Image (cartoon, helix red, strand yellow):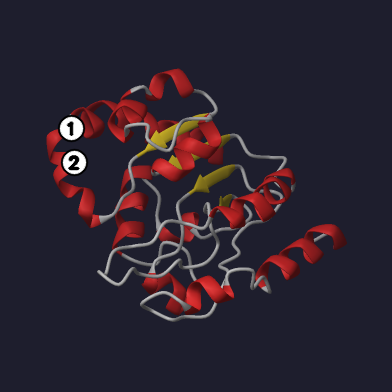
């Protein structure tokens, strides 16, 4: 690893910009950036932010959402967690916490504003980017935060060969998947083929 990348990862891993914000959430937690990328990665998974389980274990998508995402991609855990091939770079590197009502808080924008361009500049070998969820759609595609996920994902062919917009693989989206069967029948076979091509 070159010194510049090593320094970047060290600074990112020690980031505490959101300490006051996280302390004020219902979870009252401390920052724990989950840093998971190497410059040789060919596939970029651009997610939203770590969940509570990922915050605890320090491994991205080490939860039910990750199981579903890996199934969508057609890869096993060994491939998914091979940082030399797959970079996992969410819109915020830390668990944002829960609101007083128990809902997931959005990824703080200060994280992407501070780190995202620098991290992406360190990944010159990326062939394909998976845009997982509305926050990644908005940032990477220049869309409004109010853009409808269904329309963005349904327009997936226009984003090829560089990117695939996907819904978030959360269990909360199970009803969405049932209401949009084209996602499984039309998009997923193409997604798996492009993932394998990018990783080859």
For disc 2, the neighbor class at 10 Å (few under 14, some 14 to 19, many from 20) is few
The residue pinned by badge 1 equals 180
Which quadrant of the structure image shows residue 43? Answer: top right
- In the image, residue 46 lies at what x, y percent? 51, 47
Apparent side of residue 118 relative to residue 145 in the rendered image (left or right): right
Quarter in which the C terminus is drawn: top right
Which quadrant of the structure image shows residue 149? Answer: top left
- In the image, residue 39 lies at what x, y percent? 71, 50
Apparent side of residue 48 relative to residue 93 in the rendered image (left or right): left
- In the image, residue 40 lies at what x, y percent? 69, 48
Q: Residue at x 41, y 74 (%)?
A: 25
Apparent side of residue 177 relative to residue 97 in the rendered image (left or right): left
Residues 141 and 128: in front is 141
Residue 117 is at least partly visible in this image: yes
The image's mark for residue 176 is 2
The image's mark for residue 67 is none
* Residue farthest right in this picture: 3
State yes or no: discs 1 and 2 in contact (Cβ < 8 Å). Answer: yes
- In the image, residue 159 lies at what x, y percent? 47, 23
Residue 45 position (above or below residue 189): below
Tag 1 secondary structure: loop
Q: Residue at x 72, y 64 (%)?
A: 9
For disc 1, the neighbor class at 10 Å (few under 14, some 14 to 19, many from 20) is few
């Amino acid at each position: 690893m070159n010194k510049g990348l090593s320094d970047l990862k060290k600074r990112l891993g020690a980031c505490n910009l959101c300490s006051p914000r996280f302390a004020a959430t219902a979870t009252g937690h401390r920052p724990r950036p989950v840093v998971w990328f190497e410059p040789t990665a060919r596939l970029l998974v651009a997610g939203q932010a770590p969940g509570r389980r990922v915050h605890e274990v320090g491994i991205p998508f080490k939860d039910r959402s990750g199981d579903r995402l890996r199934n969508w991609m057609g890869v096993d855990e060994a491939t998914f967690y091979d940082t030399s091939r797959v970079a996992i770079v969410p819109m915020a590197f830390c668990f944002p916490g829960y609101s007083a009502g128990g809902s997931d808080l959005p990824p703080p924008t200060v994280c992407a504003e501070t780190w995202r361009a620098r991290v992406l500049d360190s990944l010159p070998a990326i062939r394909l980017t998976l845009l997982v969820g509305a926050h990644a759609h908005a940032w990477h595609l220049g869309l409004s935060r109010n853009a409808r996920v269904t329309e963005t994902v349904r327009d997936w062919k226009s984003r090829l060969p560089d990117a695939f917009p996907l819904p978030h693989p959360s269990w909360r989206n199970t009803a969405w998947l049932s209401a949009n069967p084209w996602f499984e029948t039309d998009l997923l076979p193409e997604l798996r083929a492009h993932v394998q091509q990018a990783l080859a």
